[in-house]
């Protein structure tokens, strides 16, 4: 065996050893440490921010749901039918006829459900899906627009429902990024607790 072949064969052992060490460090130890830190520092988020009602998981504060009952606040539309295992957008551009027609249909639906005039503005987040298709929040404006419908469907005073919405408004981060928003699942669960009834 030549000296070149001997030096090459001497590299295999440390290369394989380095591969095994790095695999254990980055593929096993590091993920376990990060997961452990996440569970300790943010236990709710690390567990999926699941919300239980009567011992049953009602949903996640991180994932939007398809709410259609008039007695509940409705969230953002979803391009993926709220499937958490396949988040994504529709990828339709703003000049695409399908996108334009779908948006018009959603605007008309929001106006019909909430008894708005044909000229009344509709918040964009009630008719446009988010990039993930799973956004669990709507703007405070979008939630307040739905107050009359929800109050009428549940036979509750509008001022009580409005106060409930305002108590669930989350301020924008540092007053700079995003707008004031409301978590729809959290708001709907508080709504159920307010009138003591549970619907679909």
Image (cartoon, rainbow, N blue to C red):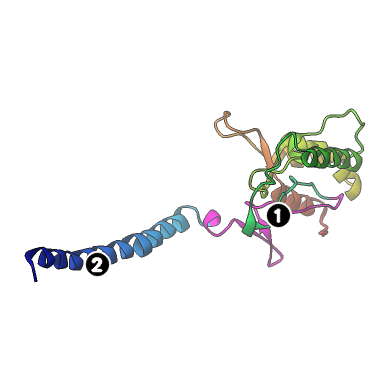
Write down the region rendered in magenta.
44-71
Q: Is 84 situated left or right of 18 in this image?
A: right
In the rendered image, residue 105, in percent from the top left (x then y), is placed at 86, 41
Decide which of 171, 99 is in the foreground and name it. 99
Q: Earlier in the sequence, mark 1 or mark 2?
A: 2
Queried whether the magenta region covers residue 65, the answer comes back as: yes
Q: Which quadrant would the N terminus be assigned to in this image?
A: bottom left
**Local SS, label 1:** loop
Tag 1 near tag 2, CB within 8 Å: no
In the image, which disc is placed on residue 82?
Answer: 1
Above or below, comparing residue 73 to residue 16 in the picture: above
Badge 1 local density, few (<14 within 10 Å), some, or many (20+)? many
In the rendered image, residue 112, in percent from the top left (x then y), is placed at 91, 41
Q: Is residue 163 visible?
A: no
Quarter of the image for residue 118 reads top right
Decide which of 68, 95 is in the foreground and name it. 95
Quarter of the image for residue 109 reads top right
Residue at 65% x, 33% y is 179
In the image, which disc is placed on residue 16?
Answer: 2
Q: Is residue 59 visible?
A: yes
Q: Nearer the viewer, mark 1 or mark 2?
A: 2
Q: Residue furthest front?
A: 2
Queried whether the magenta region covers residue 43, the answer comes back as: no
Badge 2 local density, few (<14 within 10 Å), some, or many (20+)? few
């Amino acid at each position: 065996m030549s000296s070149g072949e001997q030096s090459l064969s001497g590299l295999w052992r440390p290369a394989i050893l380095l591969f095994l060490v790095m695999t254990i460090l980055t593929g096993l130890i590091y993920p376990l440490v990060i997961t452990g830190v996440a569970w300790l520092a943010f236990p709710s988020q690390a567990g999926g921010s699941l919300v239980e009602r009567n011992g049953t998981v009602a949903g996640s504060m991180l994932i939007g749901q398809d709410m259609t009952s008039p007695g509940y606040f409705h969230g953002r539309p979803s391009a993926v039918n709220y499937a958490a295992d396949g988040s994504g957008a529709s990828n339709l551009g703003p000049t695409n006829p399908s996108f334009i027609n779908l948006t018009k249909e959603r605007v008309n639906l929001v106006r019909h459900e909430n008894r708005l005039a044909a000229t009344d503005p509709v918040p964009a987040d009630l008719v446009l899906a988010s990039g993930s298709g799973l956004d669990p929040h709507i703007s405070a404006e979008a939630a307040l627009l739905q107050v009359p419908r929800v109050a009428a469907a549940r036979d509750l005073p509008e001022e009580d429902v409005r106060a409930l919405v305002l108590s669930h408004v989350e301020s924008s981060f540092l007053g700079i990024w995003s707008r004031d928003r409301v978590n729809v699942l959290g708001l709907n669960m508080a709504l159920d607790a307010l009138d003591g009834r549970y619907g679909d």
